[in-house]
Image: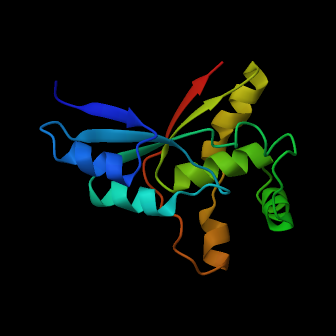
Amino acid sequence: MRAIGVSNYNESHLTELLESSIPPMVNQIEIHPCLPQTNLVQFCKQHRIAVQSYSPLGEGRYVNGQLELPNSVFDMATRLNSSIAQLLLSWSLHRGFSVVCKASSESRLLENFNSTLVHLEQEVKKKKSNRFSLKKLHICYML
């Protein structure tokens, strides 16, 4: 075995695993604006472990209104001519995560895929923040 991937491993789990002969290559975690997992993401970056985001839409709770988003998110989506789902997927992609998300229909699949066309860097420049970095975008869909 050359490489392994893990799911929902925290820093202590990863530390233990890093001491083994086969370090993890990817950690799949729930990550979205309400659950950014900043410390865990930083730990993964320090140890060259890729982060894969699942539930980037908060299990759909963002798009169906169960999780409240600030008005600035709606304003940004309007300025960027994108849906809330596209904006949230773009948030994950621009942070350098590969993304696993579910689509309930072909039209949702296309809408999600078009999140790769949402350019958050313009919004970041307006706020003079380097929070997002543009890296290779990886996205995986399940119907």
Is 74 located above or below residue 32 in the figure? below
**Place of residue 88 in the rendered image (x, y in percent of width and height, measured from the top left):** 68, 50
Give me the residue at 31% from left, 47% from top: 14
Q: Is residue 100 left or right of residue 73?
A: left
Percent across and percent down for residue 36 are: 57, 57
Query: From the viewer's perspective, is 78 left or right of 90?
Result: right
Q: Quadrant of the N terminus?
A: top left
- Position above or below: 109 against 74: above
Q: Position of residue 54 (x, y in %)?
A: 56, 37
Q: Based on the displayed image, in which of its 4 quarters is residue 70 positioned?
A: bottom right
Colour convention of the picture = rainbow
Whether residue 132 is visible here, answered yes or no, is yes
Instruction: Estimate the x, y position of residue 102 in percent, counting from the top left.
Output: 66, 27
For the point 37% across and 54% down, the residue is: 11
Residues 130 and 17: in front is 17
Q: Outermost residue, bottom direction?
A: 128
Whether residue 15 is situated above or below residue 99 in the rendered picture: below
Q: Residue at x 67, y 39 (%)?
A: 114
When asked about the image quadrant of residue 4, the answer is top left
Tell whether 23 sits left or right of 66.
left
| Residue 49 visible in rendering | no
* Tally of numbered discs: 0
Q: Where, quadrant-wise, is the C terminus in this rendering?
A: top right
Q: Nearer the viewer, residue 143 or 119?
A: 143
